[in-house]
Image (spheres, rainbow, N blue to C red):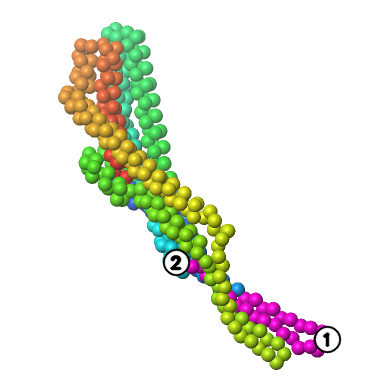
Amino acid sequence: MKKIGILAALLLLAVGASAQATMEEVLGSVEQNNATLAARRKLTTAQTLEARVGNSLENPNVVYNPTWGRPSSASHAGELEVTQSFDFPTSYAHRAQLAKIREQQYGHEYAAYRQQVLFEAQSLCIQILTYRQLRQILDEKQQNARRVVEIVTERLATGDANVLEENKAKYELIAARNAYENNEIELRAAENRLVNLNGGEPLMLAGEHFGVQPELRPMDEMLQVYEESSPELLALMSSREAAERDVKLSRSLSLPKFEAGYHHEYAPGERRNGVVVGMSIPMFGNRNNVKRAKAQSLYAEAELRSGLVDVKTRLVQLYERAALLRSSLEEYRQIDASSRPIELLNKALDAGQISVVDYFTELPTIYEVRQTLVEIERDYQLTCAEINMPEL
């Protein structure tokens, strides 16, 4: 039994190790396992099949009309009629084109939904890496606070510190511990949300740092990428194209419909065969259909123009934000790398050159710079990820 327990533990450790994944692997796993994305794929399949419905000939119509008379010995007579109705021939071509466009539109809408899910997973990965970096800083801050409490306790015993310094050190330790625990809670929540996005399957992002800082293409080049490959814009373009095709279909449905078939009559000693030819003129039923299609086409065109404007405006804002964050990032890195302020403060405290109150007056600013550096890099990573969404 002990051997089985040890083997199970080793297997669990192996599973845990294998669950460590890079950000690219995380996105691939989420795309495969996400439950709502799988449901959306099925919906897209259903929509695609629905788009193909309605372009077949109507069902044939069969009418059988037997007659009889009196007395009951009289011979029976009757007639049989089989007819098939169909729209004007161009209607079928327009319906086929419309179905093809609708299929493309549904495909683009699925791609846009997929992109949003993957962007959410990517954002969670960035948040997780941020919390892990903050954990290192907050853990160091907690250790420093605990060390100062020990120093103050020793000095208090020798009369080199006072109660005010002792209380200050203890308060700072409590605050540092709470900050660390709150960060741990946020980290676990983000990791759990990532597992939920992965359909409940265990998934752990590897690493603690962002890695290579992302580079951005020129904005004009990125705008062209959006216009050519953004699924949201492509869906709007397909919607406009479908509306234009619907106008042509509505016009073709205003043309006459035809009916053709076979007619057979029989009576005592007599049989007759013939053909049935008919035409239906849509004078009333299709009166407002063309107007409706034109209005829908105008709406689709306006929606596409609005979508293009929104993309351009959003890109300008994102690029401006990215430039500002990158500038701030470089400035904070220079400040953080210019000296070793915490080490110098520790030496000054150990040598008795500064008091505990002075120590904790200077220390929060130093840690605030380091934490702000991590948060600015997080915001820059998120901004770049949003700009590069069409490439997911």
**Residue in the picture at 34% in, 9% down:** 164
128 left or right of 323 in image: right
245 left or right of 59 in image: left
Res 302 quadrant in image: top left
Q: Position of residue 54 (x, y in %)?
A: 50, 64
Q: Which residues are magenta?
A: 62-88
Residue 370 part of the magenta-drawn span = no
Q: Position of residue 291 (x, y in %)?
A: 49, 52
Q: Position of residue 104 (x, y in %)?
A: 39, 57
> Which mark is drawn over residue 300?
none
Residue 218 higher or lower than 109, as above or below: above
**Residue in the picture at 27% in, 44% down:** 223
Amino acid at pointer 2: Thr
Q: Callout 1: helix, strand or loop? A: loop
Q: Position of residue 260 (x, y in %)?
A: 55, 76
Q: Nearer the N terminus, badge 1 or badge 2?
A: 1
In this rendered view, identify the residue nearer to me: 377 or 58. 58
**Residue in the picture at 62% in, 78% down:** 81
Q: Are marks 1 and 2 in contact (CB under 8 Å)?
A: no
Residue 17 higher or lower than 247, as above or below: above
* Residue corresponding to mark 2: 90
In this rendered view, identify the residue nearer to me: 232 or 180. 232
In this rendered view, identify the residue nearer to me: 217 or 62. 62
Label 1 – label 2 distance at C-alpha: 54 Å
**Residue in the picture at 55% in, 62% down:** 282
* Residue corresponding to mark 1: 71
**How many residues crowd around disc 2 within 10 Å: few (fewer than 14), some, or many (20 or more)?**
some
Q: Callout 2: helix, strand or loop? A: helix
In this rendered view, identify the residue nearer to me: 171 or 226. 226
